[in-house]
Amino acid sequence: MTPETHTGLQSPRGVWWKPAHKAEKVWVAIAFGWCMVLFAMMPLWHLKGGQNPSGIRRKVDPEAFFQRTQEFIAQYQIGDDRGMPIVAPPAGSDVYLTAMAFQWTPILQLEKDKEYVLHLSSRDVNHGFSLYPLNINFQVVPGYDYGLRVKPTEAGDFRIICNEFCGIGHHIMVGRVIVLDGAPQAATAETAVVAGGDR
Amino acid sequence: MTAPAFRTCPFTSLKVDRHAEMLIRANAVVSVVALLVGAVAAVMLVLTRWQAVHLLPAVWFYRILGVHGMSMLIFFIIFFEMAVLYFASTALLNARLVVPKLAWACFGLMVIGAVMVEWMMWAGKADVLFTSYVPLRAHPLFYLGIILFAVGALLVTVIFFANLVVAKREKTYEGSLPLVAYGAVAAAIIAIITLLHGAAIYIPTFLWSLDLMEVDPQVYRMVWWGLGHSSQQINVAAMVSVWYMLGALTVGAVVLNEKISRSAFVLYVLFISMASAHHLLVDPGMGPAWKIVNTSYFMYMAVLASMIHGFTVPAGMELGQRLRGYTNGMFEWLRKAPWGDPGFSALVFSVVVFGFVGGITGVAIGTEQINIIAHNTLRVPGHFHATVVSGTALAFMGVTYYVIPLIFRKKVAFWGMAKMQPYVFAIGMFIFTMSMTFAGSFGVPRRHWDISFSNAPFDVQFSPAVDVLLAFVAIGGLLAATGAFMFIAIAVKSVFLGEPLGEVTRGRAMAGVPQGLTHPPTHAPNVDELNAALHHPSRGIFGVAPGTLALAGVFLLAFVLYYFVNWKVLSFVWKIG
Ligand SMILES: [Cu+2]
């Protein structure tokens, strides 16, 4: 039987549920197989990979989260930079970072290769946590505490860019994260402060 | 009810309902007006993000960004799709428009809604960008305008289905719906799902703006993207239908297999609304299981559908060309194609950029973990400009070159320019989307007025490569905007001041009339013989479309490469869990 030669603008004659040509079958099979690979990669990365956006997630009152951040600052503050407190929590601890128009509070000083639980939340509207220059991005939503287990794998003086529009000062909303190679001492903290840009 | 007035199309001998025809025209005209607003906004935006020029002040940058998003993604596209729905449910089926008065009322409602939204945005009363994430707050009339627009659009989809039912009952066509109409049905079903999400989010948000109820910011994001992303899937389904239509009109593309193509449309309908998750992959509100199942459209079934159409559309074109006698080698069918027909060139570029740039980047950044290195960077607009602009908008532009003679019965004005327009637009968009994607890979944020951070408390210094890439974003953007203005000039001149079409003689080229109409792509006289030979088992899988199969292999290779490079890059960042 000769296959039909009608276009997409014409009604197919008779029953259109017919076997496909081999080329189409092969392509559909390849595409399907590839889709399965795409799907399998995600659970696989949860098992074997080191970067997953899982975290500990819970609802939180925005003011309560901000209070918790203030307590955290009072507990571990070691200095300040342009009025913003620098906080050096011990390895393994819970770390609190509040986003609000238009700042990230506080400045964090972490240690390389140590794990922390980084709690992100917002006091007002949505913000975007974007760690420069590593390009690590998370959404910061008011009313939700996103507790991410992070382990910095390199030392440096990093920035947090806000990459979710949050109002007219959105583009000046920049925070700071310092990662030290080795245990922090008072002196290294001072050095880090001096090194943190001169604006 | 008054009897419908019809005219008979001299090219296709289809009967065209006059009310439907007027509505197609009205929606197309408003659509082009929205395109103009959006394109002017686009020029100002790229000239601001090009840091060396930095045209707009901050407040106007964000305001115009909102205007651009609304005008393009909502008003331009959806008004055009309303025209497509009227066309597919009347002219294509020889059928009548069942409730003309209601249809006009819907059109009025949509125009009023659109004007309200634009007015609020330009007046600075809705500086909340396209997504209007609560608790950012806009004037209540902004939300009300969107609701009115959405109600109008929802009713048009209902009218579309009513037309189909009546056409079926009155037996205006024989057999099954043509594939193009079938695709429009898929688009209309997705539209209903989408617009219901729209109601579910904008009605509460409207009440919230009046302090009458609370809206949770995370729930807002989830339901809003049920509208925001799914509306892009209406575009995909409508665009694929237009691909099949343009293939038929320009090169006599045949439908390789109805079962496969239709099943792919069904996959769209079943799974595509799950894509709201693409925007929530690094959100605190949902867990990994929810994210994986939803972001993958339940195991990538909608991606599978796109990969099927991405093969069957060019394969149908190849077979169509082969049946016209262009049978030599792998690519004679492509070399001898009507590259001077703007309907054809627009179709080809739409398929290529949608697939190679939009599709591949979309799957990569829509992967749960890879999203960590993509969320809210320029990679995101880089991706969706490749799908919705280079894909959908370009396909719609291509089909307009046929709508002008077929529906408006005018010659296409500025014919020389029209032949070039798809090239200018596609090259511009290609440069734009690629540069944006690479700039985003450096972590450059989207929706950002000043990445030199000149007033920020701490310094941020992007790589000099970023400056170059943003300059290319601007150059590509300006080129594409030029293409858009060319299109607008052509469409407006043709429709309002165009030369009437007059007699068209088959086989004689005519300025202002696409080649597909002057030289209809009829198959060779011995078409059945050719077709049987191409389908012969001895030719194996390379039988009907060897060229397309080779191109599909190149596509798959690029896909696999880009996808795994992304995993590699991800593996270098901090450990996060
Ligand atoms: Cu912010």
Image: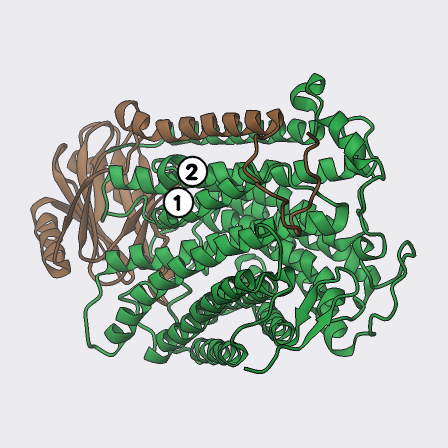
Chain colours: A brown, B green
Q: Nearer the viewer, residue B237 or B227?
A: B237
Answer few, some or many: residues within 10 Å of disc 1's Cα (few below 14, many 20 plus, some between 14 and 19).
many
Residue with the mark numbered 1: B271
Q: Check disc 2 and give the amino acid type.
A: Met
Q: Chain of mark 1?
A: B
Residue drawn at (66%, 76%) of the image: B18
Q: Check disc 1 and give the amino acid type.
A: Phe
Residue drawn at (63%, 73%) of the image: B29
Give left or right: position of A87 versus B225: left
Whether marks 2 and 1 lie on the same chain: yes
| Percent of width and height locating residue B433 | 57, 48
Alpha-carbon span between mark 2 and mark 1: 7 Å
Residue drawn at (25%, 57%) of the image: B219
Q: Chain of mark 2?
A: B
Residue with the mark numbered 2: B301
Query: Which image quarter is the C terminus of chain B in?
Result: top left
Tag 2 near tag 1, CB within 8 Å: yes
Query: Which image quarter is the N terminus of chain B in?
Result: bottom right
Give left or right: position of B429 versus B463: right
Q: In the picture, residue B226 is in which quadrant?
A: bottom left
Mark 2 C-beta to ligand 1 under 8 Å: no
Q: Give SS at disc 2.
A: helix
Q: Nearer the viewer, residue B124 or B171?
A: B171
Instruction: Write down which quadrant ligand 1 falls in.
Output: bottom left
Q: In the picture, residue B514 is in which quadrant?
A: bottom right
Residue drawn at (22%, 49%) of the image: B285
Q: Is residue A68 visible?
A: yes
Q: Is residue B427 visible?
A: no
| Percent of width and height locating residue A163 | 37, 53
